[in-house]
Structures are given as structure tokens and as C-alpha cells.
Image (cartoon, rainbow, N blue to C red):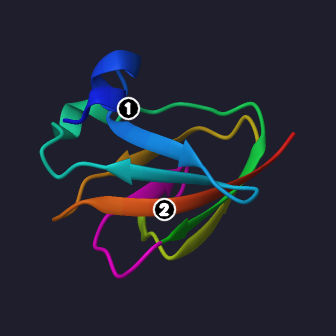
Amino acid sequence: MDQTSQVTGRPYSEIKENGYLLREFSHNSSPFEFVWHRDKEDRLVEAVGKTDWQVQLDNELPMYITKVFIPKETWHRVIKGTGNLKVKIWQKD
């Protein structure tokens, strides 16, 4: 786990880039760290590179993360895959 994750208590580190967040999840994270949650804004999440990590929206089957739109206040969770996961996140307030 990197320093950013240790400070925030979240299973990822992130940096802000040109209008989006670049977030990285470690393969060393426990699957139990990825809990159901909601966000206060719409999000478009795009994987950087090929991955077998998945996302599951409320009342839907899990789907591989390629490019996924998550409406605000929608329950969802990340499902751990192999290797690290790096995603770009665009948020709309």
C-alpha cells in the first residue's frame, strides 16, 4: 500500500490530472476493502490498460471495467481482479 492510501484509509491512491482523477488500486488490497458505496456526482470511469477487475452496479451483474458510467447516488462496488487497476475518473457535480 502506498503512502496516499495509508493516509486516506482508502484502498487506492489518486492524483488530479487534466480534468480527471487518475486512481490506482493495488493488487495487495484485501477484497474486503471494496465495499458497496454511493458517490455524490455522476462519474465516467475508464480503465487505463487491459484489466480483469470488475464493477457492479445495484441490481446488475458485475461487468469488466472498460468504460463505465455510474450515475450519482447509485450503489456500486469494485470487484478485485489480478494486478493493479488504474482508472481515469471524470466527475460531473
Give residue 5's position: percent from left, percent from top. Answer: 32, 29
In percent of width and height, residue 41 lies at 78, 39
From the image, tell me which residue sits under label 1. Answer: 35
Which SS class for mark 1?
loop
| x 46%, y 54%: residue | 56
Q: Main secondary structure of the magenta part?
A: loop
Range of residues picked out in magenta: 48-60
Indicate yes or no whether the magenta region holds residue 56.
yes
The quarter of the picture where residue 38 lies is top right
Residue 87 - label: 2
Vertical comparison of 53 with 59: above or below? below
Q: Is residue 45 magenta?
A: no
Q: Is residue 83 above or below residue 37?
A: below
Q: Is residue 69 left or right of residue 42?
A: left
Q: Residues within 10 Å of mark 2 (few under 14, many from 20)?
A: many
In the rendered image, the quadrant that contains the C terminus is top right
Say which of marks 2 and 1 sits in front: 2
Picture residue at 48% right of the left edge, 43% below the top? 14
Question: In whole angstroms, how far apart are the C-alphas of marks 2 and 1?
Answer: 18 Å
The answer to whether residue 23 of the structure is visible from this angle is yes
Kind of residue at badge 1? Val
